[in-house]
Image (cartoon, helix red, strand yellow):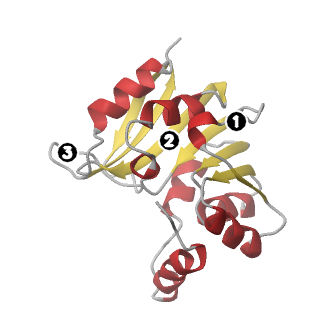
Amino acid sequence: MRFDGDQYQARFDALAAQGQDVHGEATFVRALEPTTVLDAGCGTGRVAIELARHGIKVVAVDNSTSMIATARARAPELDFRPADLTSLDLHEAFDVVVMAGNVPLFAEPGTQRALVAGCARHLEPHGALVAGFQLDRGYDLDDYDADCADAGLEVVERFGTWDREPVHAGDSYAVSIHRRSR
């Protein structure tokens, strides 16, 4: 899937100008009290920039060169890298790896297991993989949990929103926290 980074960012800029909170994902991650975060599928850097603003060391990666270009223009001091999450190997580990904004759904069909494994490889032993995505687009929680289990992770918390609202059967969105099970 191809993205135009400037156009994508304009949507969030418009929401922020209307007074909407566009930092729910970063607030959620900050509550986990990480010192380091890998923003996996960072898009235009919205989450990474907000986390860094709060003193968290962030490395941000995205497969889209347009998204990375927009992110670098917005915050040239931050570490934005073009990378395919399915084969990611940064030789670094993080307290939290976050996939905000439907990242598993933008992966090539059939590569979600590799995407999750790529993210899990970058977790500190005590680290958390955090992901929020739509559940009605062909990749659901059963699939995601199975891919996490294959990567040695188990679900420890699940919510229906980034505001930590409860998740209910039939919800079309979920935010999950997985940690190492072995």
First in sequence: mark 1 vs mark 3: 1
Viewed as shown, does residue 48 lie left or right of 148? Answer: right
Which residue: 63% across, 24% down? 126
Measuring from the top left, give residue 155's x and y in whole percent: 40, 28
Disc on res. 94: 1
- In the depicted structure, whether residue 13 falls above or below residue 81: below
Measuring from the top left, give residue 172's x and y in whole percent: 23, 53
- For label 3, the SS is loop
Work out whether residue 146 or residue 182 is closer to the camera in this orientation and state it: 146
Q: What kind of residue is marked 1? A: Phe
Which residue: 72% across, 75% down? 74
For label 1, the crowd category at 10 Å Cα-Cα, with few meaning under 14, some 14 to 19 and many 20 or more, is: many
* Res 62 quadrant in image: bottom right
First in sequence: mark 3 vs mark 2: 2
Measuring from the top left, give residue 182's x and y in whole percent: 53, 11
Work out whether residue 146 or residue 64 is closer to the camera in this orientation and state it: 64
Measuring from the top left, give residue 43's x and y in whole percent: 58, 62
Residue that mark 2 sits on: 130
For label 3, the crowd category at 10 Å Cα-Cα, with few meaning under 14, some 14 to 19 and many 20 or more, is: few
- For label 2, the SS is strand
Residue that extends furthest to the top in the rendered view of this protein: 182
Which residue: 51% across, 26% down? 179
- For label 1, the SS is strand
Residue that extends furthest to the left in the rendered view of this protein: 170
In contact (CB < 8 Å): disc 3 and disc 2: no
Residue that mark 3 sits on: 168
- Distance, label 1 to label 2, CA atoms, is 12 Å
In contact (CB < 8 Å): disc 1 and disc 3: no
Q: What kind of residue is marked 3? A: His
